[in-house]
Image (spheres, rainbow, N blue to C red):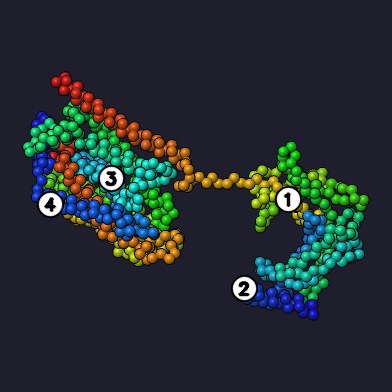
Amino acid sequence: MDFKIRKRELAEEFSPMITKSSYLLKAWIILLVTVILIGLYAFYLQVKNGHGVTGMRDNVVWGVYIINFIFFVGLSYSGAFISGILHFFQTPWKNSVSRIVEIMTVLSLIVGPIFILLCIGRLDRLYFLFLYPRVQSPITWDIVAIMTDLFGCFLYLYLTFIPDFAILRDNDVKNMPQWRKKLYTFLAIGYQDTPEQRRRLHKITGIMSTMIIAMAIVAYTVLAWIFSLTVQPGWNSTIFAPYFIIAGLYSGIGVIIIAMYLIRKYFKLDRYIRKAHFVGAGIILLVISLLFGYFTFSDYFSKWFSHKINDINLLDTLFSKYFWEFIFANYIGVLVPIIIIFFRKLRSIKSITFAAVIAVLGLWLNRYLIVVPTLETPFLPIQDTRPEYIHYTATWIEWSLSFAGIAAFILFFILIMKLVPIVPMSGIIDHERAPKIKPKILTQIHKQ
Amino acid sequence: MKAVFIRYSVFVCLIGLFISTSAAQEVDASNYRMYFKFKTIKQPDNSRLLEVSFVGRNKKDRKVSIPVFDAEINFYNTLNDEEVLLGSSKTSKEGIAQLVVPKNQKYLIDEGGNINLKARFDGTDVLDEEESEIAIKNLFLDLNLAEIDSVKTVTVKAYLLDSIGNQIPVDEAYINIYIQGMLAKMKIKDGTIKNGKFEYAFATNIPGDSNGNITFLAMIEDSDDFGYVTQKNTIDWGVMNKRANDSEHKLWSKAGPIWMYVVLTFLLVGVWANYIYTIVNLFKIKRESTTTATIE
């Protein structure tokens, strides 16, 4: 096979995805930008008027911002973990989903920490964190871990993009502006797909994929320790670190399935993202949901059985004020995906995506129930405090900024998809170049 | 009158017992076997405490015992048929009667050098007469605390006095050394007195009280020859425990633990070294493309 011709074919096949934009997509982008602008206005109000415009008060000092932070960072770490696993084990069907995972990893790691900045009352003192870091503080570890991880993920994402940049540079794609050609030439760093370059790129990509698995575990563990190293009821738990990692994977798989569904539908990639991919991802979601359910049960059961007064107070709050949220997060959010995916007859692309949506919503609520009720049931009740200082309700400012974060995530995702094809062309070439040892394995070139 | 009072007190005690243990039905003191124990304790100031423990123990259930309250006990120093009343005492609610005989008391001493002491309860209409006798030698203990060659040394001298006041060292007496605590005493050494002396080097890791003082108690206990003999002494040998290191496990300490610096440094250096390695390889890829282009 002449791979130069094949590369041209692929470039032509995927070029409409990166050069043309449908009206629907443009409308989406306008909507997302609007949401972001509303969020920026809310941010302006928050900076101008202080944190009084949020629902955060003396007791509940962390609200939906920190929940979004944990959620997005969890997405990122799970993305890094899954991406590393896909590369490390050379999973046969990885090519169709690997780029979705990699983009999700980097974008969520950009969006997530922004929520931490929204949480900080005195942003003008932010540089103190770098001027006066305290090594013994998990928050300092977290900053170092996030920055290191962000750099690593960017580097990793870039490594996987290089061969595609080279293909787009070498093949004249219709309607591609000149500045794009120059950009691809610059980003491809002269990659010619020679055996030596290919070997070198595969080697460093392989090392990076291994390393980011470990980094994801370490970094998310540190994030879990921010909670579990305190003695707060509900947080001071030895299983919090593995629990967070499982929870991160749970949400990560869920978001990947949702992204696969939307991308498949709107970019018409049925040939590349097939039902088997959804079933495969669904099975992983099933396994993780079982693990997540087990960890959740274990965590709450030990709290209930210990009969410690503060833990009992927390459980009382969860089963009274947050009853439905608790049921949704820890029962529906776990059991519905299990039931849908466990039975073969229920496994369809839509049902698996529905299960993923339920899992992601349940997990976000689970994060909410970890953060807010604990802060509402402190060890020492504050005397003469107002009820609204004890109980937390997010304001429109917080919701706007939360939705702005989600909108930014989706917008950046779309923009990156306009830069490189969402299905790596180089991956298809590599697959076709490799000797066929197992003809029955699932690949994107087999017809559905 | 006295007998009526004792009978009444025993009856009240028994009734109280029966109320608290509903299974018991006995109301008669005859169901109780009386235990009359007499001992003498020579105290640090050389006075002598005479003590009687007077309790009734249920004949069927020996775990159930009740003290005999307000029973008058007479204490005697005896020699052959001669009895010298040392004093009287009534039993407390715990059934304990105590009498302190001053250190200058002149005792009758038999040919063997023993002081014979007797405690007697004369009996009532419901309780029989009880009597117990002990014979002990008048042992003296000196407890010396001194640093010998920079070693904190505890020395106990044990001796008897003959008729003209000469010290006669005792041998083969078992002694315990305690340190007085706030609520109880703590045994730190035991051994046998040889040639009237017992000596050992004191540990240097005992904190003592807030001023660093340690109270030592040298005690011979339940000896057939000497009964109970106690001596005590106090000295500032306490070594205050070092204060726990404040810097451990605190976010506000000046520095983190060394392991944390080591682990974090290894992790970060490892990760960033890999980044540098990756970037170097990217440059090599770029250089290879230049070389390839030149060759072509």
Q: Mark 2, chain letter? A: B
Gap in Å between the C-alphas at discs 1 and 3?
68 Å
Q: Is residue A156 visible?
A: yes
* Residue at the spot of label 1: B234
Q: Amino acid at mark 1?
A: Thr
Residue for badge 4? A27
Q: Residues within 10 Å of mark 1 (few under 14, many from 20)?
A: some
Looking at the figure, which quarter contains the C terminus of chain B?
top left
| x and y percentages locating residue A256 in the rendered image | 22, 48
Q: Earlier in the sequence, mark 2 or mark 1?
A: 2
Which circle, 2 or 4, is nearer the viewer?
4
Check disc 1 and report its element: helix, strand or loop.
strand
Which label was assigned to residue B21? Answer: 2
Q: Are marks 2 and 1 on the same chain?
A: yes
**Disc 4 versus disc 3: distance between alpha carbons?**
26 Å
Q: Could you tell me how far apart the alpha carbons at marks 2 and 4 are, in whole angstroms?
A: 87 Å
Mark nearer the N terminus (4 vs 3): 4
- Residue at the top extreme? B295
User: Which quadrant: the N terminus of chain B?
Assistant: bottom right
